Image (cartoon, rainbow, N blue to C red):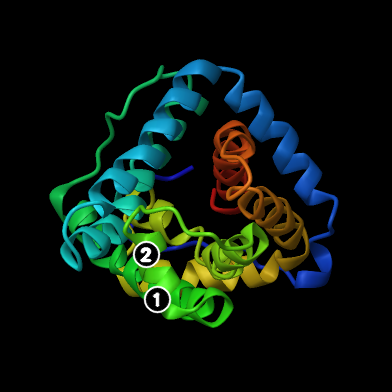
Amino acid sequence: MTTTTSTVNTLKLDSANAPFSDAAVWLKEGWGLFKKAPFKLFLLMTLFAIVPGLVQLLPAPTGLTVSKWLAPMLMATVWPLLFNLNNQQGFSFKHNATWAKWGRVAVWSVVGILLALVQFAVGSALIGSEQLSVLLSGQFVDVERWRVGVMFVSIVPVNMLLMFVVPLLLLNNASLSDAVKGGITTALKVIKPLSMLCLINMLVTFTAPYSLLPMLLVGPVLACTYFCAYNRLFK
């Protein structure tokens, strides 16, 4: 896989040529990658789930806004790590990512704030704006958990569609416009297998209000699966 090119080489295929079964291939490879450092990946992903939550407890609206920007920034660091792990270079964040690359990722991470606004709109419709405000402040709210689960799930399909943007920025050195165009175009071309991963992600995300354990356990495996999908699609 090229890490220095400034262009994006997307797949030249029709969506009909990307069968649902490709998801099983990506999952198998993702599980194999995860097994190279299961405990480290689990601890890292747990930390990356906790930190934005702690930042969100800061006075509003600063804490909430920064947390929604910080979450995708933290997750972006996982891509170089998985690249190294996949290429037998150990559990390391070291990569030839420049300040320019990370600057583009920082700009792109603003999308996390925009998606949060969509999520909040859904949450407001489901549980009410007052209760949502209390929930976001970290206080207990007596609300049906399935409603919170639906709010969490609401942005998963969009996140899946945008999944390849960050690795294209960091690993392929693509411009922001090329990464967005190439990432979305390829995601649509492999929409069948990607939709299977999306369903798994949605199921795990929906369970979060009931228990964080499924997300913490399955999340690292899914991250490895996404990398393996990227590795196959952008060589």
* 103 horizontally vs 150: left or right: left
Decide which of 34, 55 is in the foreground and name it: 55
Left or right, 155 with reference to 118: right
Q: Residue at x 84, y 57 (%)?
A: 20
How far across and how far down the image is residue 164, in percent? 49, 58
How dense is the environment of label 1, judged by Cα within 10 Å: few (below 14), some, or many (20 and up)?
Answer: few
Amino acid type of the residue tagged 2 in the rendering: Val
Query: Circle 2 is placed at which residue position?
Result: 134
Residue at x-position 67% and y-position 29%: 31
Q: Secondary structure at mark 1?
A: helix
Q: Which residue is mark 1?
A: 130
Residue 37 in view here: no
Q: Amino acid at mark 1?
A: Glu
Tell me, for residue 77, which label it has, or none: none
Residue at mark 1 to residue at mark 2: CA–CA distance? 6 Å
Rendered residue at 45%/19% (across/down): 40
